[in-house]
């Protein structure tokens, strides 16, 4: 798993360079056309990129978390979730337990964020939290933790910022070029040298139209690859691919879309928050591989190592080329965990988990919960002023402090 | 200076750089093994601390399980004493404790009142998670040891390792006697 991180860093550098070159060419062409000096265009492109990158680097996680309405929880709020995150932190060898957030949304999703492993967060929707049993939760959290551990979050954030700059410049650039070009061609028709400029103009327009598409395809391909790798790492950490597979199955069966997601934040989630039913299987313009395929790969694994994932991937795709970088494959055989860990007998069922989760959500909204002797739960709003309250079910009176 | 002198100096410098890099890599791996061991230690201690609490909570409900409870307490005390021992002996003591605990938790099924006790449920969650954390920290420790040992034994890093006194690490196995088969629960009293 250490080789994994190194090859990931190499790959991110390569990808960033490719996207960077595209950005430089766009800046060059814009500068050449508008200011007759390519340097000016480059400076403008670099400035826009630098501003976005700085904001992204320092603020992306807090913007993302506050946009999705995530609430930070403490270990006492939801011991099971906290424990599962800590278990995966230990299994992955992270140094610090990430901050844990719950999003109050019935859609089933989860994401990880944070620019480096020591300042990372995982967030999970309340819907998913009550749907998953312990093994499945472990699989999902393992997936998110490996995004943190493999530095995927920073890679995808920086890439999406480069991509955003390219799209922004190309969109405005191509429109300005197109219209000023039409106006200019009439004016300059009498002048010499108009032809050279027209060729530059056409090349520039074609490039401006193609560049964002090209950049997006690279970005999506990398994002999908990172998802496969996070699945493989999750299986390795938990030693139990079935946990994640069955969690993905539950997630795939639901159709609710997450209200707070948007296009820029999509690659962070465990599944694509915008996926629609019946869409073509292996889609070039998707941030995530199809769920059914991810499940098939996980279930085809003979062991829990990267090598096993790679073989399962090749088997499912009938391809000779795997998805795990060669450096990660040289590990020893890793068996799947067959012995159940302790305490499974006392596991909560789905109704109990739903109650547990809703208790947490009420508490996070500063509601006080009193359980009456008759079994009714009274939720006391934070602005409730009376000193006592009567149970509507059995009529007992409860004193409030 | 003649050209060959420069070549010799160049080779020496390159060798020195490689030596330093390999040495630093070994130190990093050894520290990782140490950290991973500390993690296991934390989780084992945590389990030792949880058990008196668990025994206290279950005692009131389990009138007929004195022997099971005593076995857990005894295994715990042995494991606490083995804390300062080497990985092998320690693994054995912790294995005994694990199997005593799983016998206790299997017996819990017979006591619906206990299973509804909020205190017990919270304890059970902590215990389950601690068991998992022990398993996962052991997994990470053994992975780290494997990697470290590979580096100390494989050429060329083994040359540096033997020159500077890096020794192979010891794997940590918790030997549970009946881990392979499911726990038998008998309902005759």
Image (tube, grey):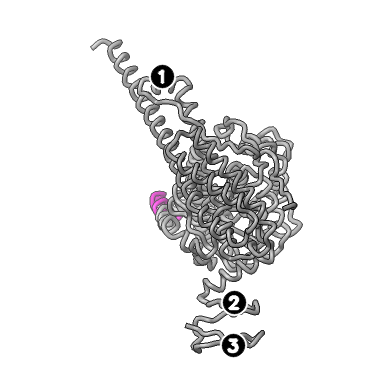
Please tell me whether residue B21 belongs to the stretch shown in magenta. no
Say whether residue B120 is left or right of residue B152.
right
Residue nearest the observer in this picture, A360 or A199:
A360
Check residue A390 in the rendering and tell me which mark sits there, or answer none: 3
Q: Chain of mark 3?
A: A
Q: Chain of mark 2?
A: A
Residue B119 percent across, percent down from the top left: 56, 64
Question: In the structure shown, which secondary structural element does the residue marked by tag 1 occupy?
Answer: helix
Residue nearest the observer in this picture, B20 or A316:
B20
Of badges 3 and 1, nearer the viewer stands: 3
Disc 3 crowd, CA 10 A, few/some/many (<14, 14-19, 20+): few
Residue B101 percent across, percent down from the top left: 59, 48
Residue nearest the observer in this picture, B125 or A368:
B125
Please tell me whether residue A42 belongs to the stretch shown in magenta. yes
- Which residue sits furthest left? B1
Of badges 1 and 2, nearer the viewer stands: 2
In the image, residue A33 above or below residue B153: below
Disc 1 crowd, CA 10 A, few/some/many (<14, 14-19, 20+): some
Q: Residue at (54%, 44%) from the top-left corner?
A: B75
Magenta highlight range: A34-43
Total marks shown come to: 3
Report the residue marked by disc 1. Answer: B159
CA distance for labels 3 and 1: 79 Å
Q: Is residue A6 visible?
A: yes
In the image, residue B108 above or below residue A309: below
Check residue A371 in the rendering and tell me which mark sits there, or answer none: 2
Q: Earlier in the sequence, mark 2 or mark 3?
A: 2
In the image, residue A162 above or below residue B4: below
Q: Residue at (60%, 67%) from the top-left corner?
A: A357
């Amino acid at each position: 798993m250490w080789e994994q991180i190194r090859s990931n860093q190499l790959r991110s550098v390569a990808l960033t360079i490719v996207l960077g070159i595209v950005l430089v060419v766009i800046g060059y062409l814009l500068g050449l056309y508008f200011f007759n000096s390519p340097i000016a265009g480059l400076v403008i492109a670099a400035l826009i990129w630098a501003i976005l990158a700085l904001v992204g680097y320092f603020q992306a996680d807090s913007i993302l978390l506050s946009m999705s309405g995530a609430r930070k929880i403490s270990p006492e709020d939801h011991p099971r979730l906290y424990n599962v995150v800590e278990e995966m932190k230990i299994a992955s060898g992270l140094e610090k337990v990430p901050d844990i957030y719950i999003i109050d949304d019935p859609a089933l999703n989860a994401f990880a964020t944070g620019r480096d492993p020591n300042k990372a967060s995982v967030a999970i929707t309340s819907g998913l939290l009550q749907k998953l049993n312990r093994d499945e939760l472990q699989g999902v959290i393992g997936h998110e933790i490996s995004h943190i551990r493999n530095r995927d979050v920073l890679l995808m954030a920086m890439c999406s910022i480069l991509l955003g700059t390219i799209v922004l410049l190309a969109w405005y650039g191509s429109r300005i070029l197109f219209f000023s070009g039409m106006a200019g061609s009439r004016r300059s028709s009498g002048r010499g040298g108009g032809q050279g400029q027209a060729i530059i103009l056409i090349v520039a327009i074609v490039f401006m139209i193609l560049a964002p598409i090209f950049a997006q395809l690279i970005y999506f391909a990398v994002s999908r690859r990172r998802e496969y790798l996070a699945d493989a790492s999750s299986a390795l950490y938990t030693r139990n691919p079935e946990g994640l597979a069955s969690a993905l199955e539950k997630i795939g069966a639901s159709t609710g879309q997450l209200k707070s997601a948007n296009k820029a934040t999509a690659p962070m989630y465990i599944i694509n928050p915008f996926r629609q039913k019946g869409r073509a299987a292996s889609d070039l313009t998707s941030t995530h591989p199809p769920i059914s395929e991810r499940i098939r790969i996980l279930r085809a694994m003979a062991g829990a190592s990267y090598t096993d994932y790679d073989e399962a991937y090749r088997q499912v795709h009938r391809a000779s080329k795997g998805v795990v970088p060669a450096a990660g494959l040289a590990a020893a055989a890793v068996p799947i965990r067959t012995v159940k860990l302790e305490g499974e007998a006392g596991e909560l069922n789905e109704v109990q988990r739903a109650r547990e989760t809703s208790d947490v959500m009420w508490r996070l909204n500063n509601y006080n919960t009193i359980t009456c002797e008759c079994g009714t739960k009274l939720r006391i709003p934070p602005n409730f002023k009376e000193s006592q309250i009567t149970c509507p079910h059995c009529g007992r009176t409860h004193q409030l402090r | 200076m003649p050209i060959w002198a420069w070549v010799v100096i160049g080779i020496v410098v390159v060798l020195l750089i490689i030596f330093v890099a390999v040495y630093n890599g070994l130190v990093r791996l050894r520290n990782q093994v140490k950290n991973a061991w500390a993690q296991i230690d934390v989780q084992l201690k945590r389990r030792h601390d949880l058990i008196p609490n668990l025994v206290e909570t279950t005692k009131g409900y389990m009138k007929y399980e004195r022997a099971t409870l005593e076995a857990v307490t005894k295994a715990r005390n042995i494991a606490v004493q083995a804390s300062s021992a080497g990985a092998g002996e320690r693994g054995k003591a912790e294995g005994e404790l694990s199997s005593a605990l799983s016998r206790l938790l299997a017996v819990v099924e017979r006591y619906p009142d206990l299973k509804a006790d909020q205190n017990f449920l919270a304890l059970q969650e902590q215990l389950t998670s601690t068991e998992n954390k022990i398993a996962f920290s052991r997994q990470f420790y053994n992975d780290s040891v494997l990697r470290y040992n590979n580096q100390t034994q494989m050429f060329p890093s083994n040359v540096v390792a033997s020159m500077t006194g890096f020794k192979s690490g010891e794997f940590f196995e918790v030997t549970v006697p009946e881990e392979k088969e499911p726990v038998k629960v008998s309902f005759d009293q």
